[in-house]
Amino acid sequence: MTYLVLAALITASIAIVLIIAAKRPYYHKHVTFPGIRVLLQALLKRGYDGGVLIIEDMKSEKFVQFAKYIKEKGTIGLESSFPQAPWSAQYYEKVKEFLRSEGIPFVVQRVDTSPVTEFIDIDCRTDIDLALRLVEGIFHNVFQIREPSFKVRGENISALDQLIDS
């Protein structure tokens, strides 16, 4: 009888560990810039409306994020939004300076939330090169991280290799 109780406890413990692990987001770790390109392409092609890709430096936890939008059937794109928040306040104006120096258009969106008060929105449309240029430029020129090693997490991206445009 004690073996059955012990086996049941072990089985229950394993099940709990697996359930907890399954609920955690999956990160691609030690991703380089060529890998970022592949993941941005996946978001653009296979992401649902509002799908997100968060690209984070593994050491500093500074990040850049992209969201996919679908305006109407066949009209898709990627947008990056950089927050004015306590962690990013020292970089906020530097991001604007970088975008101006590169001739990259952006819009400042004010929000009525705290602690985030506004966002710098950059519409990359379907231009993966522009999106990758943003990632490289912000990490190198704004965050001053010369050799980042990324962990990347996606949300609302289909596992099937098919275009999602509606």
Image (spheres, rainbow, N blue to C red):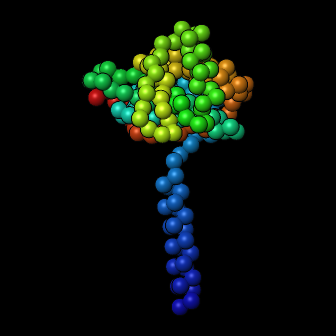
Horizontally, is 123 left or right of 21 in the view?
left
Q: Residue at x 35, y 23 (%)?
A: 76
Q: Is residue 35 above or below residue 22?
A: above
State which quarter of the image contains the C terminus.
top left
Q: Residue furthest left?
A: 73
Front-lying residue, 23 or 98: 98
Q: Is residue 142 visible?
A: yes
Q: Residue at x 67, y 20 (%)?
A: 141
Q: Residue furthest bottom?
A: 1
Q: Is residue 11 above or below residue 154?
A: below
Q: Quadrant of residue 78?
A: top left
Horizontally, is 149 left or right of 14 in the view?
right
Please give the count of numbered marks on the rendered protein.
0
Image coordinates of residue 8 in percent, x first then y, are 51, 79
Front-lying residue, 143 or 41: 143
Image coordinates of residue 24 in percent, x first then y, are 52, 52
Front-lying residue, 116 or 125: 116
Q: Residue at x 55, y 68 (%)?
A: 14
Horizontally, is 52 left or right of 56 in the view?
left
Image coordinates of residue 113 in percent, x first then y, are 44, 38
Q: Is residue 42 visible?
A: no
Image coordinates of residue 38 in percent, x first then y, are 53, 27
Q: Residue at x 71, y 25 (%)?
A: 144
Q: Quadrant of residue 48?
A: top left
Front-lying residue, 49 or 91: 91
